[in-house]
Image: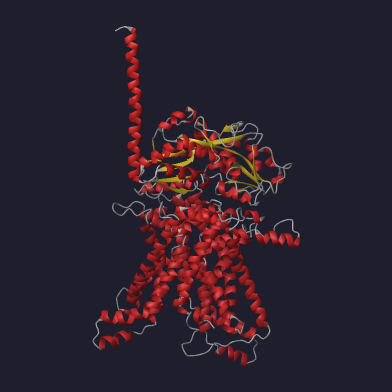
Amino acid sequence: MLLYGSMRSSAPGDAGFFTLQNYFDAYGDRETPRLFLNTFFIVGAVTLLSAVVAIFFAWVVTRTDTPYRGAITLFMIVPFFIPSILEVFAWALLLSPRTGLINVFLSWLFDLQEPPFNIYSLGGLIWTWTITSAPTKFLLIVGAFRAMDSSLEEAALTSGSSHAGAFARITLPLLAPAILAASLLTFVRGMESFELPVILGLPAGIFVFTNKIYEVLEFGFPPRYGLATALAVTLFLMTAMMIFVQRRILRERSFAIISGKGYRPMTISLGRWRYFILAICAVYFLIATVLPLSQLVLGSFFEVFGIYDWQALTLHHYRTIFDDPLVWQSIKNSFLLASAAALLTMLLSFGVAYVVTKTSFALRKTLDLISWVPWTVPGLVLSLGMLWAYIRLPYPFEIYGTLWILLIAFITNGIPLGVRLANGGLAQISDELEESAWVHGATWLYAFRTITLKLMAPVFFAGTLILFVTFMRALGPVILLYGHGTELLSITIFHLWQRGEPGTVCALSMVLLAIFLIALGAARLMGATGIHDQR
Amino acid sequence: MNGKWFAALLFILLWVCVIFSIFSASAISAEVEAKARAEGRVVLYSCPGRENVEPVVKEFERQHPGIKVQVSYGKGSQLQEKIRSEARAGRPTTDVHSCGWNGLYQFGLEGYLEKYQSPQQNYFDPATVDKSGLTLSHSAHIYGLVINTRWVGAEESPRSWSELADPKWKGKLAIQDPRPGGGGFSWFVQMLTDANLGENYLRKMAQQKIFFGRTNDLVHSLLARGEYFVHIAGTEERATTEAPRSAPVKFLKPRDGAFYTRIGLGLVKNAPHPNAAKLYIDFTLSEAGQKTVADTGYLPLRKGVPSVLGPDALQGAKLAVLQTEEGIKREPEFAKKLKEIFFP
């Protein structure tokens, strides 16, 4: 549908003709080479910087004797559950050039005439992007750090190498495939990122593919769907290429460094430095998590953002959201849709994963590959593709503007992650368990129900929770598909921000955060985050 | 029949006609009211923000219990694209669209609005009534300069549009992004067609590093918190009746010409709740509705309803060029010029 849409002269659902003009417009624009350059430079810088942060914290919590490593891990994981859109809003407020708290404080402290930071700049964009993507990267690589056999490091140390030398010459090269795979994934996710480039990039005039597509649709008068779709096809091809590279690397190398035998990872004694490392971690958490969250809390209680006068203290923003039927409708829709989509995605994913891992079905590899395909489709591109596909369906399938189209978008978007989670879970269950049940006279259904299903229950619920959180905060996959009455919480918050209601956004953020913290608590109870077993 | 009898008969006939029309009008409105109640709700897509719409909605719901108004806010181009998509998908959900008159009228010309003449329009100045029946103007608002009084003192505050071209304002000005229409575009056209300002002035303004915000409300919010010092083409009601107590903002009418735009309502084609929609439109144009509209800071267009901004609020302000016949015709030319000067 994307290819079809990129060659149409009209908007989705309107009469038009086939043309290549959209591609001529897209590639004839002198700004397009800069789009490629910006996308690769910004996302590349973010990938590199977030890798540095993630490697440092993974090393601290798995290979050192720094105190409170469990707490450090927890603080590194919590931001993963905070919707990045809220962090972006918080940073947009904190580093606002003239009124951001950090700028006001530093200007006062050093008697500066000009604000030191501007969030609406290349630096501001890269900073916020790095801070918001580091937790994901940490989660992706910390497992490899923990699972790495340390006998080679020990051998290096025994041969006279220093800790730093062993880390640089042994640890990093050994973990390189895992770090590279995680970096490629972060890179792809960066190319797909929607809210951050739109909220911070557009006002600064910094364009990457996603905010350019959005700009063409939002500021085009009328919206230029053909041009947006031609750009979307390009973005899709780029992400598909990156995913292909990542899969090749994962398949060939990633597990070679982790041995299956029993071992205990080596812990480096840092001596007095361990408190210094702890201080670095504490400062990072203060800056990356506490500061933005405090800004949201503060912003929700003041009449006008930036004017922190005692007399301007108010509960008006909370009253506004509790009185607004649209907010309640959005919360209801988000809950309903995220729950249903998460549950259905996991059911479908388990079906696919079971066929792929436990059966000899001839097309199981093709099925596995198909389940990967949506991974290559950025959320905004999926939204645009679905608009072309579903806008004009015959009765009774008119699903545009209903919750059904959002449900399909979420399931499509979530399938790759669901299948990976289910695959991982099923791979841990030996085929012998079911086979021995059959040998003792059990039917296939009985063996499946009493063995596989029972053993998979924790993975299923953990996966459902992860997908629930993912869908609750998703914006890109649904931004072009919602209609009146099907607004979601993420969409409502985004529109409130665009309408210049930062106080209301902060108040609503508190509600959303409460939902996420409850989900995080539930996930922790079920062991979905793996926090329980951190040392 | 002599003249006396003829006059008496004519008088009785007229009287019967008057009585009949009153009864039939109330019968019609009773029928509309009953159907509206059965429909139960109105879906409104509104460019005017929460502060201007919520009071009207609350008063309407109080007067018409059983009919709920569901509002989606946004900028005109975005809301109109949603209505187009709903129409393409064969799932219209919107009943009433409210926006600046010119954008609304053009949307009507595209075929997305149903013609509707409200009986309440008899109480409006005929000059403000759209003869085509596609739109129903209900109020106006004045555009001028809004300054942040924390940053801009009384002595240094700009008094005219032309003063904004002074380099001292570089990086301190903000305006609604003019590309999708709205107040920012109205300002651009106003300046372009002004004999004293014109293209030269706009080219100087293009050097001023103006911040283009997505919506007028966003720009106002950034101004109130002190991120920018002057909101170009800010509206009076935003800086007066709607501003929170602690917001340091002030509206100024530029010496070289404030301008105003009309805000209208349109009945969306194939509206799922057409009777409730008509009832809502009628209410907004009624005396009670117009008084509520006036309380929000908009200038009511119904005769005899006073504005909270004072009787002289519109004095010295011109109707925006974009809201005239000529302005509508020349819009593509203006859009081209905008791109050339500000977004090359």
Res. A384 image quadrant = bottom left
Q: Could you say where residue B113 lies in the image, as x and y percent from the top left? A: 40, 39
- Residue farthest toward the right in the current orientation of the protein: A111
Residue at point 46%, 59% (across, down): A489
Residue A31 to residue B103: above or below:
below
Residue B268 to residue A474: above or below:
above
Asked if residue A233 can be seen in this view, the reply is no
Q: Could you say where residue A236 lies in the image, as x and y percent from the top left? A: 45, 61
**Which residue occupies the foreground of this view, A424 or A176?**
A424
Q: Is residue B38 left or right of residue A501?
A: left
Residue at point 60%, 68% (across, down): A290
Res. A197 image quadrant = bottom right
**Which residue occupies the foreground of this view, A408 or A256?**
A408
**Which residue occupies the foreground of this view, B73 or A30?**
B73
- Residue farthest toward the bottom in the current orientation of the protein: A158
Residue A102 to residue B10: above or below:
below
**Which residue occupies the foreground of this view, B216 or A245?**
B216
Asked if residue A342 can be seen in this view, the reply is yes
Residue at point 74%, 41% (across, down): B155
Q: Is residue A125 left or right of residue A431?
A: right
Residue A160 to residue A133: above or below:
below
- Please identify the quadrant where the N terminus of chain A is shown: bottom left
- Residue farthest toward the top in the current orientation of the protein: B2
Residue at point 67%, 62% (across, down): A102
